[in-house]
Image (cartoon, helix red, strand yellow):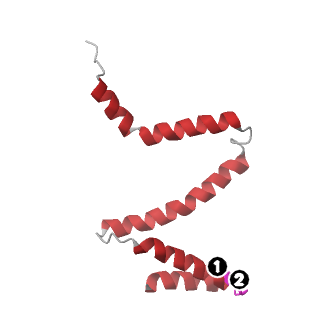
Amino acid sequence: MQAEITRGKLVKIISEFSIGLALAAEVILFSQFSQYFFTTENLLNISLQASITAIIAAGMTFVILTAGIDLSVGSLVAFAGILTTSVLRIDLPVYVSLTLGILAGLLF
């Protein structure tokens, strides 16, 4: 007996895998238009940019799990980042600026 795929099942499958399908379409499209897409340098650059978002998302996961859903988390991350880079600009050591940024995040 062959299982029939109805329109409703097809829509459900597409909606469940839409993000993966969109990612696959983007990879195929970008690789066709640029010969540099699959280079090591480009893939490292993409990974570096995505890692920043992943770190923030990991922190936000803990906020959501503790039922502390709050929009100020993004502003706090921005503030800590601006504080860290501002301290770096006045030629203090890296460990001082990172410590101040982390302490500001913990304090607020």
Is 56 magenta? The answer is: no
Quickly name the residue at label 2.
89
Occupied quadrant, residue 91 = bottom right
In the image, taking residue 69 as reference, residue 99 lies left or right, namely right
**Residue 50 x %, y %:** 57, 56
In the image, taking residue 27 as reference, residue 57 lies left or right, namely left
Residue 53's disc is: none
The type of residue carrying mark 2 is Arg
In the displayed structure, 81 sits above or below 33; it is below
**Residue 108 x %, y %:** 43, 84
Q: Residues within 10 Å of mark 1 (few under 14, many from 20)?
A: some
Q: Residue at x 63, y 52 (%)?
A: 46
Q: Residue at x 69, y 36 (%)?
A: 33
Callout 1 secondary element: helix
Quickly name the residue at label 1.
85
29 vs 1, nearest the viewer: 29
Number of numbered discs: 2
Cα–Cα gap, marks 2 and 1: 6 Å
Q: Magenta span covers which residues?
A: 88-95
